[in-house]
Amino acid sequence: MSAIASPVSGRIEPGRILTWLLLFGGGLLMVTPLAFMFATSLKDSSEIYDLAFFPAHPTLENYVTVLSDGRFLRWFANSFGIATAVTLSNVFFDSLVGYTLAKFQFRGRYLVFVAILSTLMIPTEMLVIPWYVMAKNFGWLDSYWGIMFPGMMTAFGTFLMKQFFETVPNDFLEAARVDGLNEFAIFWRIALPLVTPALSALAIFTFLSNWTAFIWPLIVTTSKELYTLPVGLTSYAVEAQVQWELIMTGAALATLPTLTVFLLLQRYIVRGVVLAGLKG
Amino acid sequence: MAGIAIERLVKRYGPTQVVHGIDLDIQDGEFVVFVGPSGCGKSTTLRMVAGLEEINDGTISIGGRVVNRLEPKERNIAMVFQNYAIYPHMSVAENIAFGLYTSGLDKAAKRKRVEEVAEVLGLTPLLERRPSALSGGQRQRVAIGRAMVRDPAVFLFDEPLSNLDAQLRAQMRLEIKRLHQRLGTTIVFVTHDQVEAMTLADRIVVMRDGHILQVGAPMELYEKPADVFTARFIGSPTMNIMPAKAVAEAGRSTLRLGEAPLAWPTALPSDVLIGVRPQELRVLDQGEAADLILSGTVAVVEPLGPETFVHVEAAGGLLLASAPAKNPPAVGSAVQLGAAASGLRLFDAQSERAL
Ligand SMILES: Nc1ncnc2c1ncn2[C@@H]1O[C@H](COP(=O)(O)OP(=O)(O)OP(=O)(O)O)[C@@H](O)[C@H]1O
Ligand SMILES: [Mg+2]
C-alpha cells in the first residue's frame, strides 16, 4: 500500500478512489460492531437499550464486575491455555509433517498428502459426532484434552507448511547435511527458521480459531470450570436475565489476547527472509 | 588431506543412466576442474562424492577409504554451492561456526577458529552482519569460510562463481587459487568458465553425456583436444570449426577446403571437421603462401590492443582470424587467410572425436 498516488504524475487515478471507497466501506463495516461493543461495555445497565453510540455516563463498573467474577478469569485462563497448547502443537506437528511431505521422497508420499488434504473438505459440523463418540470411548469427555484433541494437528496447517517448505531451496538442507547436522536438526535449526512468516501466520490463525471456538467446546464440556471463554460468555446470556453490558465487557476483554497475539507476531510476517541467503 | 579414487561410478535416475561408469584418480592436494556441456553429469558426480546423491554402482574412495555408504558428515569433505546456501537467519560468524557443528570444540575454541578464517578471507569486520546485508562476493566468501573452517580433506565446489559479475569472479578466482596454494587441500571444482578451468586446474576433466572424455593438464587439452567440445571450450577466442570433405587413398588423404587441396599424411573419413584457432589463422600479406588458404570478406574488425581479430565471411562460414595490430584490413575488403598444417586439428564429422 505504499504507492497510493501515482509517484510520477502526482495525479490520483479514478481507480484509486474507488479502491479507497471500497476499503473504507469494508473497514467501517468491520470496525463499527467492535466500537459498539467497547461503547456498550462502558454503559451502565440502565442505558443498554438506548441506541446512542456514546454512553451518557461512561463507567468502568462493568469491568470491575466481570474481572472480580472468578468464573470469568477461569474461562479466560482455560481459553488461553487451550489456545496456546493447541497452537504450539500445530506449529510443531504441522510443520514436521509438512516438511516431510515437501522434502522427502518416499513410497506413499502422494497418497498421504491427498488423504490429509481430503479431510479439508469435511466441515466441522460433520466431524462433531465422530469426535464425540471418540472422546466418549476414550473417556475424554468433559476434560481439557477432550476440548483440544481434534485440533492438535490440522490438515490446513500441514498443507500450508508443506507449501512453504517447498520454497526452501534444497541447497540449504544439503549444506547442513554436509555440515553434519542430523535430519531433525536440519528441520529444527535450518528449515523451520526459514519459514517463520508461514509459522507466524499459522500461529495467529490457530490461536484465533481456538480462542473463538464455540461449538466443540460447548458440546464436549459440561462442568462450568472447564468452559472456554466463548462458551462461558454465552452462559452469561442464558442465566436469569441477559446482561448485555457484562457480555459486551467480557467480549471486549476477550479481544485483548487476539490483539496482543497479532501485534506480537505480525512483524515476523515479512516475506523475503528465505531468499536473503542466496545469490546476490 | 586425501586423494579421491572413483571407479566405474554409475548413477541412474529411474531408468535413465546419467553417469556411465566413470574412472578417475585424483591425487592428494590436486586441483581438479570438471567441465562439460550442461546436463553431462558434473554436478551429479560431485554430489556423489559429497554423499548427497546415492551411488548406484562402482566405488568412491576418499583417502583410501571407500565412502559409498557414508553420510556426508562422515566423509570429511566440505562443499560450496552455486547459490552459496549460507543460512539467512544467522550472522556471518554463526554461519562460519556451523562448519564446526560436529567438531566438538567448545565455544571459545570455535570462536577462535572462526576469527582465524574470517581474517584469512577478509571477513573480520562483517562477522556480526546478516547475509542479507552482504554483497554477492562477500556471501561467497562466507560460504567458503564455512567450508574452510573445518579443515576438510577435500573441498568440493559446484560452479561457485557463476553468480558473480566478471570482475568479482576474477578476484574470487585468484582467492581460491591462493587458498589452494596455502592449504594444499584437494579440490574438485565444477565450472562452465574456460578461464576458470585453465587458470585454476592442475588437471581438467572433460565430461560429456555421463562419460569422461578427456583428462589432462590445461595445456595438454589446449594442444590436443580429444573432441570438438573440448577444442571449442578450451582457449579464447573459440576455435574455428569448418566442415570439409576428404578423399583417402593409400593411407594418405586429400582435404578439399579453401583455394587448393591439402595433402594429409593419414587416412581420413570422408566428412571431417577442421579446427583452427584464431591465433593460428592469420590474414596473409599479398602473395604470401600457407598450407591452408581461405578467401573471404572482412565483416568485423576487433582491435584489442596487442592483437586484432577480424571476422571474415568465407566458404567455411564466419571465421575468426588474427591480423596485424597495425594496419588491419578494412571492413568489406577481400582478404586471404592462411594457416600452417601444424595448426590444424581434425575431427570426425559424425562423432566429433579428434582424428
Ligand atoms: N533428480 C533428478 N532426477 C532425474 N534426472 C536428474 C536429476 N538430477 C539430474 N538429473 C539429470 O542428470 C543429468 C546430469 O545432471 P547434472 O546436474 O549432473 O548436470 P551438470 O553437468 O551439472 O549440468 P549443468 O552444467 O547444467 O549444471 C541431466 O541430464 C539431468 O537432467
Ligand atoms: Mg551442475
Image: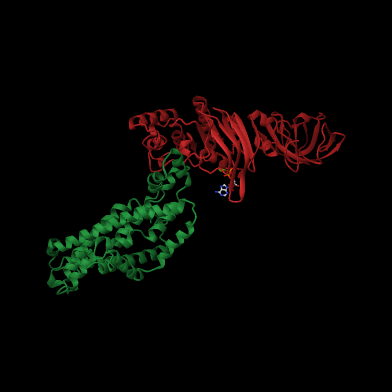
Chain colours: A green, B red
Q: Is residue A166 visible?
A: no
Q: Position of residue A190 (x, y in %)?
A: 40, 45
Does residue B52 sit above or below A64 in this rendering?
above
Q: Position of residue B115 (x, y in %)?
A: 38, 29
Q: In terms of image quadrants, where is residue B319? A: top right
| Point 78% across, 30% down: residue | B341
Q: In terms of image quadrants, where is residue A73? A: bottom left
Residue closest to the far top: B182
Q: In terms of image quadrants, where is residue A32? A: bottom left
In this view, the residue in front, B75 or B149, is B75
| Point 60% across, 32% down: residue | B25
Q: Is residue A172 visible?
A: yes
Q: Position of residue A61 (x, y in %)?
A: 12, 64
Q: Position of residue A169 (x, y in %)?
A: 47, 47
Q: Is residue B296 left or right of residue B158?
A: right
In this view, the residue in front, A197 or B77, is B77
Q: Is residue B69 left or right of residue A36?
A: right
Does residue B156 sit above or below A6 in this rendering?
above
| Point 73% across, 42% down: residue | B351
Q: Is residue B117 left or right of residue B322?
A: left
